[in-house]
Amino acid sequence: MQTAAFFDLDRTLLRGASGPAFSAAMKAEGLLPDRSIPGEALVFKVFDVIGETIPSMIATRQMARAAAGWERARVQAAGRAAAAELVDAVPGFARQQIAHHRSLGHPVVMATTSPHDLVEPLAKALGMEAVIATRYGEVDGRYDGSIDGHFVWGPGKLAAVRDWAAANDVDVSRSYAYSDSVYDVPLLGAVAHPTAVNPDPRLQVLAMIRRWPVKHFDVPAAVPKVAGIEPQRALQMLAQPELFPWVRFDLDGADLLPRQGPAIIVANHRSYFDPLAIGYAMGRVDRPVRFLGKKEVFDAPLVGQVVAAMGGIRVDRGSGSDEPLALAAEALGAGEAVVIMPQGTIPRGRALFDPELKGRWGAAKLARMTGAPVVPIGLWGTERVWPRSSRTPDVLAIGHPPTVRIRVGRPVSLAGRSLDADTKRIMAAIVDLLPEEARVRREPTPDELARALPAGHRGEPGAEDARRPGSD
């Protein structure tokens, strides 16, 4: 017998409710009054926040009676129109999960309470093999006000899944199920591999007790969400200049940052403050980013957990593994933005003042693997906010805050002839975004050199610092 994967729709494959799209499509077909239904928007908003409730499901069941007399063909047309909108709203990680099951030969099935004729076009657009959904009774091409078979909710969803499985040589007890709702516990408890996706509060608790995995298809696997918000977005909402009186931000070119779709963000590295500066810039276009970072950061107590919760991708340079690039490619495939600092680490000593930026080829290789655009950012002044010599940023510089200059450029045109050549193009694009003083070779002052060395460094900075750019 086969193993199948069953996916709920609302708040699982979709971030929220499908209802607004279906309602708009049915109004366009003349099935519903072409006006706002009192309380409709509030009902959908409540559903987005807390999920299914018994009153909402009672109302959903009564829709079969309200639909009596509707032409089935017009409902199907509304479903096709809504699918054209909803298919683009399915998060990238949900698509990857569907693709993963298909690669294993698992039939992928949408199992939802919603009317079959409305959701079937979306399931087909997602490449699903079957739909298990509530079917309305029909006479002569019109709904008759009844439900044909199971009302696919709670125990009724499990019963409908078992009926379909029996007819399709599928073993439910070996299968997978994904849902957000505590009312889908009968199905989740019947399969070998249950997953709570964007769970409602009660399912969140139950998943913890039963040790079921919890996922959110709109963020990478290791990123948690609290009240529907991932930590990085919460921080971006707080990242207002007024909350950073010890630093001034000078940002230009934010309109060149992609607001959606995959993007590789590359920047020079001058300070531990650089990720915050990039996060500030990305916050202007309201999207999170996934940073590739050294394993030492992830291994640090507390800091490592915070970085992982932000969607950071661990890089162990000594291992030679391609796993970090594979994880970055997976994030890009899901439509995420990934940040790479090609220099790898903060140049120390005289290397920090070298006008020629030397980069590793990870960003170029990732661009070749994925076809994602490479967007350069030039950073300047972050080393004054948080110098290499300090273990913390200078938050006391309120009376004389340094300015962090952030410049965003157009995507880098890569020739693709070699990774080295493309890396040089990337680094040149970053240099072009730096101020004129960054392109002039000069001898740094003793104080500047001291600030460019790690905290606790002993001895005078010397020539070895210039010979080993990027070393730690």
Image (cartoon, grey):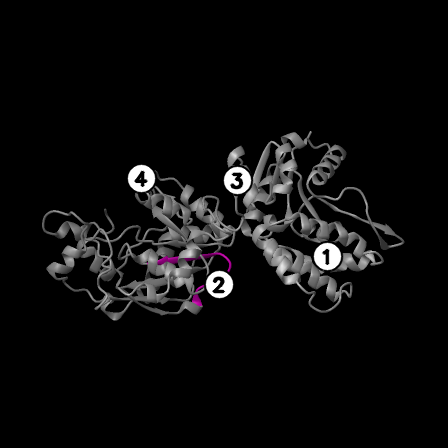
Comparing labels 2 and 3, the label whose residue is closer to the camera: 3
Residue at point 28%, 58% (across, down): 357
Q: Which residue is mark 2?
A: 259
| 223 lies above or below 441 | above
Of the two numbered discs 4 and 1 on the same chain, state the one appearing first in sequence: 1
Q: Which residue is mark 3?
A: 205
Query: In 3D space, how far apart are the residues under numbered discs 1 and 2 (Cα atoms)?
Result: 28 Å
Query: In 3D space, how far apart are the residues under numbered discs 2 and 3 (Cα atoms)?
Result: 34 Å
262 drawn magenta: yes
76 drawn magenta: no
**In what element is the residue under mark 4?**
loop
- Where does residue 152 sit, x and y in percent of width and height? 72, 43
Foreground pick, 387 / 335: 387
Of the two numbered discs 2 and 3 on the same chain, state the one appearing first in sequence: 3
Residue at point 73%, 66% (across, down): 28
Q: Which residue is mark 1?
A: 79
Check disc 2 and give the amino acid type.
Arg
Q: Count the marks.
A: 4
The magenta span reads 256-267
Quarter-of-image position of residue 304: top left
Q: Which mark is residue 318?
A: 4
